[in-house]
Image (cartoon, helix red, strand yellow):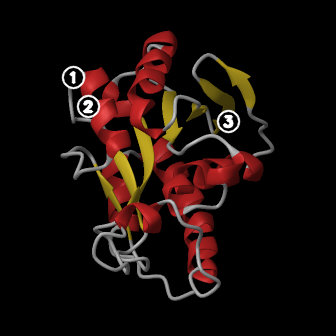
């Protein structure tokens, strides 16, 4: 099958722009821009389509807010008739340092509300996810403020470098599959 679903998770609204929790939106925005694709409002999501070497990437940014991301992902999987193994969910990840990215073919939600929602709506954790490390350099009890906070000027060079590389990794996922994408991504170390 040549169709895939790429879901960049985040929260809609100006208050969430350029925050750590919205990195899924930022990653997919960059991918679309790279391929000259424009998002339009659609059912439960902003949506665009990218064609790469015979593959069709249906790209969505759920407009359901992070905690209900699964509703949009399930809707577009069903509408486009795409299997769970052929989706890639782009999310922020506290448990991974800022200098790293990690791809996994499946796994737990690790406390991420967007992944938890997808698990609930899909009834499975067997779908690929792209975890963009945001680190965990925040004082005890300040996790929410950190996640919903904006990148520092020190972090931005690494973030920008990772977003650019992320587009390449998503293309590898589309063209060569999750194993190849994992091999290319999981040992990378970014220094900004």
Residue at image point 67% right, 43% down:
13
Instruction: Say how many tags the image has.
Output: 3
| Neighbourhood count class around disc 3 (C-alpha, 10 Å): few under 14, some 14–19, many 20 upward | some
Select label 2 or label 3 by which is in front. Answer: 2
Which residue is denoted by mark 3 in the rendering? 50
Q: Tag 3's secondary structure?
A: strand
Q: Secondary structure at mark 2?
A: helix
As measured in the structure, the alpha-carbon distance from the residue carrying label 3 to the one carrying label 1 is 27 Å
The percent coordinates of residue 18 (x first, y second) are 64, 61
Marker disc for residue 123: 1
> Dot 1 surroundings within 10 Å: few (below 14), some, or many (20 or more)?
few
Q: Earlier in the sequence, mark 2 or mark 3?
A: 3
Q: In the figure, is residue 2 to the left or right of 116?
A: right
In this view of the protein, which residue sits in the foreground, 178 or 135?
A: 135
Q: Quadrant of residue 57?
A: top right
Q: Which mark is residue 87?
A: none
Residue topped by disc 2: 119
Taking depth in this image into account, of 97 and 83 the one nearest to the observer is 97
| Residue at image location 38% in from the left, 41% down from the top | 114
Up-down relation of residue 16 to residue 141 (above or below) = above
Tell me, yes or no, whether the two marked residues, 2 and 1, touch with CB atoms within 8 Å: yes
Q: Position of residue 153 (x, y in %)?
A: 65, 84
């Amino acid at each position: 099958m040549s169709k895939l679903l790429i879901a960049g998770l985040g929260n809609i609204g100006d208050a969430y722009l350029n925050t750590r929790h919205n990195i899924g939106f930022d990653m997919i925005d960059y991918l679309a821009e790279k391929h000259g694709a424009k998002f339009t409002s659609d059912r439960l999501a902003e949506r665009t389509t990218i064609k790469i070497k015979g593959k069709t990437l249906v790209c969505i940014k759920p407009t359901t807010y992070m905690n209900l991301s699964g509703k949009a992902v399930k809707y577009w999987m069903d509408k486009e008739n795409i299997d769970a193994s052929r989706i890639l969910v782009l999310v922020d990840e506290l448990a991974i340092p800022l200098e790293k990215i990690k791809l996994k073919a499946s796994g737990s939600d690790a406390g991420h509300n967007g992944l938890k929602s997808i698990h609930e709506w899909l009834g499975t954790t067997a779908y690929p996810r792209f975890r963009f490390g945001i680190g965990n350099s925040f004082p005890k009890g300040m996790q929410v403020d950190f996640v919903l906070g904006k990148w520092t000027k020190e972090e931005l060079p690494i973030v920008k470098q990772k977003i650019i590389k992320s587009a390449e990794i998503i293309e590898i996922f589309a063209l060569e599959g999750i194993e190849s994408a994992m091999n290319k991504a999981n040992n990378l170390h970014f220094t900004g």
